[in-house]
Every structure is written in C-alpha cells, then in structure tokens.
Amino acid sequence: MIRIISRIAGFYADGFRNLSSWGRKVWIIILIKLFIMFAILRLFFFPDFLNKKFGNDKERSEYVLEQLINSPDNHDGKH
C-alpha cells in the first residue's frame, strides 16, 4: 500500500517538475485562491459559534440536536 502511494506521489511530483512556466503560474494562482477561500474567509465569515456560545461538549451537542429536531424543514408536513 505504501509503495502505491509513493508511486502516485512521485507521478504528481514529476508532473509538477515538468510544468511550463505558464502552468506553474496557473497553479500558484489556484493555490493562492484556495488559501484565501479556506483560511482567510473562514476567519472572517465563519466564526466558531459553538465554542463561543457554549462552555462544554454536552451543551454544544444538545444545542445542535435541538436545532436539527426543531428545524423548519422538519415541520413541512411531509413524512
């Protein structure tokens, strides 16, 4: 299994090594966009609501369960 993973990783590493300068620039742009989407936007638009509002895991789980059970989607009359 490790040998297969090693061969796959080598395949991709070799492919990236042989990219043209245009291809490298495109990948740099893609990686920068991914970083912005997953790191920076998460900090500003998706705060850790449960950790701030509740002190322990039991309170968090009770809140999530209550939200799932009492969500508007569960009261649409379809069963």
Image: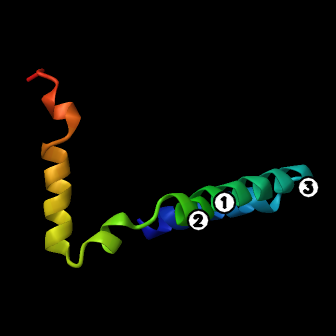
State left or right for residue 5 relative to residue 21: left
* Callout in the foreground (2, 3): 2
Name the quadrant of the C terminus. Answer: top left
Q: Residue furthest left?
A: 79
Identify the amino acid type marked 3. Answer: Ser
Residue 14's image quarter? bottom right
Identify the amino acid type marked 2. Answer: Ala
Marks 3 and 1, how far apart at CA: 23 Å
Q: Is disc 3 in contact with disc 1, using a CB cutoff of under 8 Å?
A: no
Identify the amino acid type marked 1. Answer: Ile
Q: Residue furthest front?
A: 53
Marks 2 and 3, how far apart at CA: 27 Å
Residue 15's image quarter? bottom right
Which secondary structure lies at badge 1? helix
Marks 1 and 2, how far apart at CA: 6 Å
**Among numbered discs 3 and 1, the one appearing first in the sequence:** 3
Name the quadrant of the N terminus. Answer: bottom left
Q: Residue at x 23, y 78 (%)?
A: 55
Q: Residue at x 19, y 73 (%)?
A: 57
Q: Position of residue 46 (x, y in %)?
A: 47, 59
Q: Is residue 74 above or below residue 47?
A: above
Can the viewer see residue 19? no
State left or right for residue 72 relative to residue 17: left
Q: Residue at x 25, y 72 (%)?
A: 54
Nearer-the-camera pick, 21 or 47: 47
Which secondary structure lies at badge 3? helix
Q: Position of residue 17 (x, y in %)?
A: 80, 62
Q: Is disc 1 in contact with disc 2, using a CB cutoff of under 8 Å?
A: yes
The residue identified by callout 2 is 39
